[in-house]
Amino acid sequence: MILVSFEVNGTAVRVEVEPQDTLLDVLRQSLGLLGSKEGCAEGECGACTVLLDGLPVTACLVLAAKVEGCSVTTIEGVASMWKGEEGALHPVQEAFIDVGAVQCGYCIPGMIVSAVSLLERDPSPDEKTLRQALAGNFCRCTGYNKIFEAVRRAANRMGGDL
Amino acid sequence: MSANPPAQRDIVRRPDARAKVTGKAVYAADLIRSSMLFASIVESPHPFARVRHVDAADARAMDGVEAVLTAADIPGRNQIGVIQKDQPAIVSDWVRHPGDCVALVAADSPDLAHRAAQAVRVDYEVLEPQLDTLKNLERNHPLIHPERDQRDNLCSRHKIRRGDMEAGWREADVVVEADLETGAQEHMYLEPMACLVTPEPDGRLRVEGSMQCPYYVQAAVASVTGLPFSKVRVIQGTTGGGFGGKEDTPSEFFSRCALLAQAVDRPVKLFLDREQDVRLTSKRHPTRMHYRVGAKQDGTLTAIEARIVGDAGAYATLTPVVMYRSTVHACGPYRVPNACVDTFGVYTNRVPSGAFRGFGAPQACFGIETMMDRVATALQLDPCEVRLRNALRPGDEAVTSHALPSCDGLEDTIRVARERSGWSQNWHPPGAGSTGRYRDGMGMATIHYGNSLGSPGWYLDASGAHLQVNRDGSVALAIGHTELGQGVLTVLPLIVAQALGVTREHVTMRPVDTDNLPDCGPTVASRATIMSGNAILDAAGQLLDRLRPLGAKLLDGEEDELQIEEGKLYIRSDPENFMTWEELAEEAFLANVHLAAVGWWVAPPSTFDSETGVGTCYFQYAYATHVARVQVDTWTGKVRVEKFTCVHDVGRAIYPAGIEGQVEGGVSQGVGYALLEDLRENPSGHILTHNFSTYILPSAMEAVPDVETVCLEYPAPHGPLGVRSVGEPAIIPVASAVACAIANAIGLPVDRIPCTAERLRLAWRSAAGEGGEIEA
Ligand code: FES
Ligand code: FES
C-alpha cells in the first residue's frame, strides 16, 4: 500500500493505493467519482480522460501512485471551472446539450474534458486544432459533427459572442 | 415533401443529456451493492473441441471464491438460443468458438474471479476449426452441430424465385457478373457489456444492465434458472450504445451472471473488458456474394441472380432473420421482372455473427448497388439515371412480387440527392475525373428498408405503452423499448405531448422494467418509435375518451368543439376562455376518473413464402439515397470522404435533430465499415484486433466534414403520425456509396469492403503494372 495525497476537483484527498492501481481505479473505486468511464483500459478510447495539472490524460494509463501532489479535474469538477452561477454547467456542457451532441453518453465525460481543456488552451480553435484535440476520444454514436458544433458554440459563448 | 425547418433544431433538448454531460448517468459498471461478487467466465482457448472433463477443485478451494459452476450445476434448461435452440449457457460437450463458456466463477474481487477462472482445468479433445463458409457448406464436411439431424452446416436458407430467368437473360443487352465480399464489423459501442444481478428478499432476481432487449434477457434468465418469468425482473440501465450488439448477446452474459447470483444468493456483477467484449460478442455477418445482372441498353433491369453466403459463426443466434433481411433486400428497391436469390447462413467455428445496425441489409446493399454501378458502366450511362429508371413506383411489384406500400418517396430521394449533392455538375464516368495523385469520385446508393421485424418476427411484433396522468397534470410514460442513445426518451414524450395535447415538459419516462408492461418485443429493427408510438396513441386515445367529456362539461361546451393543445383546453369558438391541463387533471381526479391506460399495438401481419419468396415481407418501408464524394490518394491508398448527402423519406420528422444525429452517426459507422474496420484473426480464427489500437474506428480526424441530412415526409401507412424508420436506414447505403465513389474515382472495381488503404493501394499498383504508377 502506498499513501497518496492529491487534489481532486479542488478538494484535497489522501488515499491508499496498490502500486498497480490506475488513477481511474482510484477515482472510480476509492473516491466514488463514477463519471469517468472505462472503455478500453489501454489509453485508446478516451472515455476516462481527466485533467492532470490542467492537461488531459487518460486516467486508465496513469498510475495512481504517481499523482502525489497533483491536481486532478474530472467531469464532476468541470462545471466549477467556469465561474457561472451556482449549479450552472460549464458552457461546453451546455453546448453539448443544446446542439444534441449527446447520444448514448458513454464517450461524453471524456469528450467534454478534452474539449474544455482545448478551449482553455485555445479559445477559438480552427477546424484542424479542434479535430486533433478530440482525436483521442472515440465516439461511436454521433459521427462527431454535432460534437464539433457544440465545441464551436461553446467557444463563441465563452468568448462572449453568444 | 418538406425539408426540416432549421429553427426547430435547438428547441428539443434530450431529457437524458444533462445527466450524461455531468457524469451523473449511471451505467451498469457504476452499480454497486454491498456484499457484491464478481463474475468471470472460463473461456475455451480452442475454437473447436470436445470437453472431456472439467476440474474445478483448485479454483473452488481458493479463498474468496464463492462459486464455480459448470453445465451440471444449471437448475433450469441449459439453453439460451433465441431462435434455434442450439446454444448452451455453459458448454457441456462441444466447444464451438474461441471463448465459448465452459464454466463460471464468482469471487469477491474481479481479479480473484479472473485468477480462479484460470485455475479451472479443462481437458479438451481439440478438433480442427472449420472456418471456411463455402467449404462448410459441402456435404460430408465435419459438423459443428452434430446433435442436429441435419447432415450439413447450413444454419439458414432463404430464396426468391420470380419470373423466368432464361427470358431475363435473353432480353438483356448486357450482363454483368461479380464476386463480392464484405467483412465482419465489430460494434465497438463505447460501453462494454455489463450487468448486475441481485437476488431479492422475495426470491426474485433483479437483473440490471446495459441492453437493448429486456424481454429477451428475461426469457433467457428464466430458462437457465428455472424461475418463472414473473420472478425475473429486468431493468435497463443507461446503455452506452448498442447498434445491435446488445440485442441478443446480453441474454448470454446476463443469464450466466444470474446463474451465479442464484447459486450464491448474493449480488453478482459481470462486466467484460474491451478485449473480452470484442472476442466474445457478436459481429456483423461477413458475406461472400455472387451477383449476375442483366439489363437492356437503356439500363432497364431484366434479371438478377444473387447468391449470398453469410458466416453465422458457432450458433444460430439471429442468423435466420439477418439472412431473411439480406434476401428481401438483395435486389434493392428496383423493378426486377426476373430474379433468383439464394442466401445461406453457415455455421463456422467463430464467435456468432448477429445483429448489427442494418441487419443483413448493408451487405445486400453493397451487392446490388455495386452491380447497379457496373450496369451503368457497361452501358456508359449515368448510374443515377439507371437507378431512376428502375426505382419502384407506386403499384410496381418488388422482387417479392408485392407492391411496396407507399413508395412514392423513393424516386424523390434519388432526385433530391442528385440535386443537393451537385451530382449533375460533378459526376464523371469512372476514372475520368481528376488525374495525378489525388482522384475525386462520387458514388450513390439507394435503399428501401423494411420497418420492424417482418414476416418471421411477426409473432413478437407488438408493443405496449402505459400512460398515467397524475392529479397535478404530470404524465408518466412507461414503454418496453430502450434508450440506447438513439433518442427514444426524447421522441416518445413528443408523441405523448402531441397525442394528449400537453407539452413535452408534462411527460416523464419511467425506466424500462419488465414489471411495467408485458413483452413489447425487442428494441431493434428501427421499430421503437413506430411500435411504442402507436401504443402511445392507443393509450392516449383511451385517456382522452375519459377526459374530453369532463373537459367539455367544465367549459360548458360540446365535446366535439373541445380543443386540447399545449396543456390548455378550450372550446374552439372561445379560445380565450381556457382551462389548464393541470386543472383538468385535478377535476378528473376528484371525479374518480380512471387516469391510467395501457395502449397496445400489433404490427399488421406480413408474409413470405419460403419456396418462392413471394410475400409482403414487411408492413412498411423507409427509403433513402446517399451520395458520397471522396478523394483517393493513389500513392497511399487512403480515401478521404469529403461530403455525404443523405436524403431520407422519414415519413414524418418529429425530432429533426435526432434524425440528423442518427444519420451523422450512421455515416461515420458506415465509413468505418467501408474503409477502416478490418477484423483480423489468426489461422485458427482467434480475433487479433480486439481493442481500439488495432481495430480502427473513424476518429475525429476521419469525421466526414460535411454531412447533409435531408428529410422527405411522405407519411407512412402505419407509423404513428406517419413516421418511418431512420436508425438503420442511416447506415445501410453508406458503405456502398463510398465503394461506388472509390470505383468512380479510380476507374477500378471495388469488390470487397473494407476497402482499406493497403488493399486499395495494392489494387491500384497491380492495375498500373508491376511497381509502376498510373500517371496521367
Ligand atoms: S479507458 Fe482509458 S482510454 Fe479507454
Ligand atoms: S455518444 Fe455514444 S459513444 Fe459518443
Image (tube, rainbow, N blue to C red):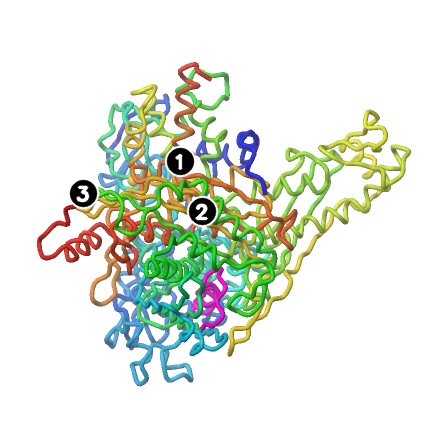
The image quarter containing residue A40 is top left
Measured along the vertical axis of the image, is residue A153 above or below residue B452?
above
Mark 2 touching mark 3, by CB under 8 A? no
Q: Nearer the viewer, residue B655 or B748?
A: B748
> Label 3 crowding class (10 Å Cα cut-off): few <14, some 14-19, many 20+?
few
Q: Are marks 3 and 1 on the same chain?
A: no
Front of the two marks 1 and 2: 1
What's drawn in magenta, residue-wise? B311-339
Q: Give the image location of residue A58, x and y in percent.
A: 28, 35
Task: Report helix, strand or loop for mark 2.
Answer: helix
Mark toward the start of the polypeptide (2 vs 3): 2
B31 falls in the magenta region: no
To which residue does mark 1 refer? Answer: A145
Front of the two marks 2 and 3: 3
To which residue does mark 2 refer? Answer: B28
**Given the image, on which type of amino acid does mark 1 rest?**
Asn
Report whether B133 appears left or right of B255: left
Measured along the vertical axis of the image, is residue B508 above or below residue B282?
above
The image quarter containing residue A74 is top left
Q: Give the image location of residue B619, x and y in percent.
A: 60, 61
**Given the image, on which type of amino acid does mark 2 rest?**
Ala
**Given the image, on which type of amino acid does mark 3 rest?**
Gly
To which residue does mark 3 refer? Answer: B436
| Quadrant of picture, ligand 1 | top left
Q: Which of the chains bears the disc numbered 3? A: B
